[in-house]
Image: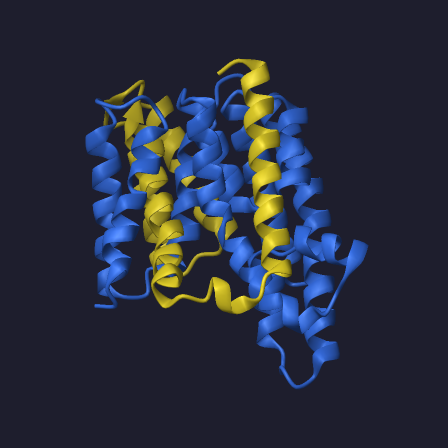
Chain colours: A blue, B yellow
Amino acid sequence: MGVAIPVGMYGAAFGAAGIAAGLSIWQTSALSLLLFSGASQFAIVGVIGAGGTVIAAILAGVLLGLRNGFYALRMAPLLGVSGVKRVLASHITIDESTLVALAQDHEKVEQVRKGFWFTGLGVFFFWNLFTVIGALGASLLDNPSKWGLDSAVPAAFLALLWPQLTSRKLQLIALLAMAMALALSPMLSPGLPIISVVIIAFIAGWNSR
Amino acid sequence: MTNTGIWVAILVSSGLIFVARIVGYNVPGSILAKERLQRITGLIPIVLLSALVGSQTMVKSGEVVIDHRLAGLLAGAIALRLKGSFLIVLVIAGLTGALVYNFS
């Protein structure tokens, strides 16, 4: 249950970001219902808000959401689900459900499964509820800048990024990516500078050192 | 982006992420368990989020600008450094950005 409050806040922030980027309440909620992967959803509205193309928005969203496929690989043997349950499980395979499940003692399969389903379904409920609340709230505001909304959105990205920067090397990679996106912004159409930094992941990840 | 374009972006990316998850549940783990692939995909969220932080803070209509958003982000970074919760970080960044925007 401890995960509900941060998820709610984050969901409300996403709802507000969707409205600030020019999506309707329906569109913002559709992302939370159908895509259901926080960073990916933020990236899509980020590209749309910046005036990017449809392709750029899709690419940014998919690249950020791909990790859920890797979580699925990890969870498949532990959950042992098939049919409709497998489809349900795959939709709630996200950072939180996977991490909570993997934090349980792997010998106790029941606990692993309980952790996964409880967290996944709980986050799904609160995430969608608060997306609507955030979107409704933001649609009442006249000018997002006046209310600090456009400053809170990049801070939300930074808060997601922060715990991942566990070494000097990763911090350097993050700074490089930021610099590259900024440097390319005047030259490329919106959204492309964001996607182009994937090349840094390839170069830095190619060799183990 | 047009309204239709937004819906296309929403539905196509949702569909593709759904496929990624379903594929994960249906292929033997060894296929994607290549070390290099794991390293690269592990870095992708980091580079994309960094690029998003940069462009959401300092880009406006294709120009690099310094405005109230940077003040908000820096305040948020300080809050993160002091181990503030997600909510605290957003509130501090939002408040700082709003203050600078309204009083400068």
Q: Please tell me which residue is depicted at 60% across the width and 46% down the height of the picture.
A: B19
Report which quarter residue B68 is drawn in: top left
**Left or right relative to A146: residue A73:** right
Residue A142 in view (yes/no)? yes
Image coordinates for residue A168, horizontal then vertical, percent: 22, 63
In the figure, B89 relative to A153: above or below? below
Image coordinates for residue A169, horizontal then vertical, percent: 22, 62
Report which quarter residue A29 is drawn in: top right
Which image quarter holds the N terminus of chain A? Answer: bottom right
**Left or right relative to B102: residue A75:** right
In the figure, B33 relative to B68: above or below? below
**Left or right relative to A171: residue A32:** right
Report which quarter residue A170 is drawn in: bottom left
**Left or right relative to A8: residue A122:** right
Which image quarter holds the C terminus of chain A? Answer: bottom left
Out of B54 and B81, give the one closest to the viewer.
B54
- Number of on-image labels: 0
In the figure, A128 relative to A44: above or below? below
Question: Which residue extends farthest right?
Answer: A84
Q: Please tell me which residue is depicted at 53% across the width and 13% down the height of the picture.
A: B2
Image coordinates for residue A163, horizontal then vertical, percent: 40, 60
Out of A122 and A146, give the one closest to the viewer.
A122
Question: Which residue extends farthest top?
Answer: B2
In the figure, A79 relative to A92: above or below? below
